[in-house]
Amino acid sequence: MTSATYDSKYAIETRDMHIYYGAFRAVKDVTFGIERNKITALIGPSGCGKSTVLRSFNRMNDLIPGARTEGEVLYHGQNLYGPDVDAVQVRREIGMVFQKPNPFPKSIYDNIAYGPRINGWKGSKAEMDELVERALRGAALWDEVKDDLKKSGLALSGGQQQRLCIARALAVEPEVILMDEPCSALDPISTLKIEELMFELRQNYTIVIVTHNMQQAARASDYTAFFLMDKDDRAGQLIEYDTTNNIFQNPKDKRTEEYISGRFG
Amino acid sequence: MSAEINASGERSTGRLPQGEAVRQNVAVRQRRGRVWEAVLFASTVVGIVILVMLAFNIVNDAFGGIAVQSVVEEEELTDGRQLEALSQQELVGILETNLRSRVLRNLERERPLAERSKEELIDIINQEIIKPEVVAIYPLSEFLFNRPAIEAELAEAFPRAELQFKSWLNWNFLTSPMSSNPLQAGIRTAILGTLSLLLLTILIAFPLGIGAAIYLEEYNSDKPFDERSPVGRWLNRAIQRTAGLIETNIYNLSGVPSIIYGILGLAIFVRALEPITSGAVFGANEGVTANGRTILSAALTMSLLVLPVVIISSQEAIRAVPSSLRQASYGLGATKWQTVWKIVLPNALPGILTGTILAISRAIGETAPLIVIGASTFIVTDPSGLFSKFTVLPLQIYNWTSRPQEEFRAIAAAAIIVLLILLLSLNAAAILLRNYLRSKRIST
Ligand SMILES: Nc1ncnc2c1ncn2[C@@H]1O[C@H](COP(=O)(O)OP(=O)(O)O)[C@@H](O)[C@H]1O
Ligand SMILES: [Mg+2]
């Protein structure tokens, strides 16, 4: 899927994207690009289609019966919804962290090792140990769990579980990490840790994060996309997309301004 | 607790009880609750009473007293000494003086008496001379609590009879084959039949049922053929319709009376597939006697019978695996099969196992379908393979309870106890297995 010749500042680009759940169009007409090695936040009121858009980036919507995506989602210049693209390969390169921490009921070690193993890992046990450590360090969890990697992932606190899920995603060496409100189930301190972590990860990964939390978007992202539901057909649409600074300091659309100043949504 | 009534009526609609009425209202509601509690307790008690009665009934028949009367008393033969205390020569002497010469000659021809061991000689003396005979049997309750009446009755009818305790459930009973004499009849054949039928049914119904459940739960929405061609679309539709039909009818199937499965099994496995189920095509020569009425036919029929329940309980266990785990797996680039095999199944397995073992254990007690497919009711040889004749415990019990003699009722009760123990241990095994798997799947 990776083509060396393709060269764009965007990791992912959507063109005229419409997403349907059965007959209902949940998202319409989205055209924008996610910049490489940056953090892009998707904001907007509940039900405006942020999660739907995020899931379209790694074809998780395919798992929902009746869900359908029209238009193009380009990754390295290739349409992810093209006829020859396998969703499994897409998800291996574009990882995902979910709203509710969902570690497997396995040991911490096996949680991390699961991804590499199912993706055809060929290394030795020692190399796997190394990979597990690197992933856990990458997710800033190593120091807290290095002494009991055999412990169940479910025995960790909520914030630790979410970092375990991030580590698990890192272990398959993705290029892009999608996060759907990763902090909404966490306390403020865990939230802060995850935000710091995102800044670290930005050097090596492209991150797209859905958030409900205005401060978080303002604090922790480089670009912000504001979505809003069209009152007539209830389809979510992209209202404004710019650097986070511009969106928060100097929004061009009145609806954006109203939303970030808390006047609706 | 006094509610303030707003004078102007602003805070109160006046439609809710106030003041003293509140207390009364609460008291009435509490009383109603207590009445229901009593009703619920009563239904529990009824259940327990029924269970106790069942247990009493079985135990009452399976244990009790027997009155044994011998043709000749042991003491008369031996001048008051015990048979065991006599020497070999003395035993031979007793046989020679008490047996008719023809019987004696036959015994000598089999093997000279002088060469036989003491135990053997005592057995012969017991069987041929003393000849203990059960002249009356009494259920446990009478034996324990009605002793004087029994003894009086015995003294009149069988003055030499001796009243003794008898457990019809004993080692001999477990290890002897069927016999038309209730005192010698055992359930060895039936136990072996039940166990092998159970094992075969598990081997057949388990993989089929779990497989179908996985397909219906995880793959049902898949479109395996190319949607762009009309043929592919048609095939996909056909597959989905079929799966939908199965899915909606599985509950109906699980409610079909078991005898109907017996009729189905008779038509398909015993008759239509006879060459296979009798083992003829595999060159098994037992098939000649059993035709299609083999243990294999029975296992296939039982599998049909339990399959709907196995599928339903497996589906429920699979459905109980949180979808967030599936999503996590897919999100890491796992294929559907990897997700099913490595995430869904291990997490569903404890539930699948308990559900299906319970379903299959129900089949142990089934009688009707086995009668229909022609299981043997009187058979003395152990089942020896897939293609042999067989009988099972419930069939044996059914057979015995339908006979008039009281002895048969007693051994039927003993066989029921064995069947119940088998059932309970299977259920216990299911629970232990589940707990073991749960603890292995580290989860806290
Ligand atoms: N699985 C689904 N099936 C049908 N409709 C859905 C599904 N998921 C989301 N929707 C609908 O799509 C719209 C957008 O949902 P979502 O993307 O979850 O919004 P957000 O994440 O911004 O709150 C909502 O109207 C929601 O009801
Ligand atoms: Mg959402």
Image (cartoon, coloured by chain):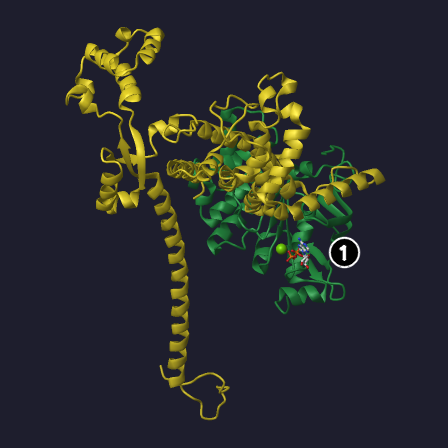
Chain colours: A green, B yellow
Q: Residue at x 21, y 24 (%)?
A: B74
Q: Nearer the viewer, residue A151 or B237?
A: B237
Q: Is residue B77 left or right of residue B401?
A: left
Q: Is residue B84 left or right of residue B264?
A: left
- Viewport quadrant of the C terminus of chain B: top left
Is residue B31 at all visible to an observer of this figure?
Answer: yes
Q: Residue at x 52, y 47 (%)?
A: A162
Where is mark 1, residue-wise? A23
Q: Is residue B45 left or right of residue B206?
A: left
Q: Quadrant of ligand 2?
A: bottom right
**Furthest-left residue in view?**
B80
Residue B46 on image: x %, y %: 39, 57
Q: Residue at x 66, y 47 (%)?
A: B249
Q: Is residue A216 left or right of residue A258?
A: left
Q: Residues within 10 Å of mark 1 (few under 14, many from 20)?
A: few
**Furthest-bottom residue in view?**
B8
The part of the image, by quadrant, that contains residue B184 is top left
Residue B415 on image: x %, y %: 41, 36
- Viewport quadrant of the N terminus of chain B: bottom left
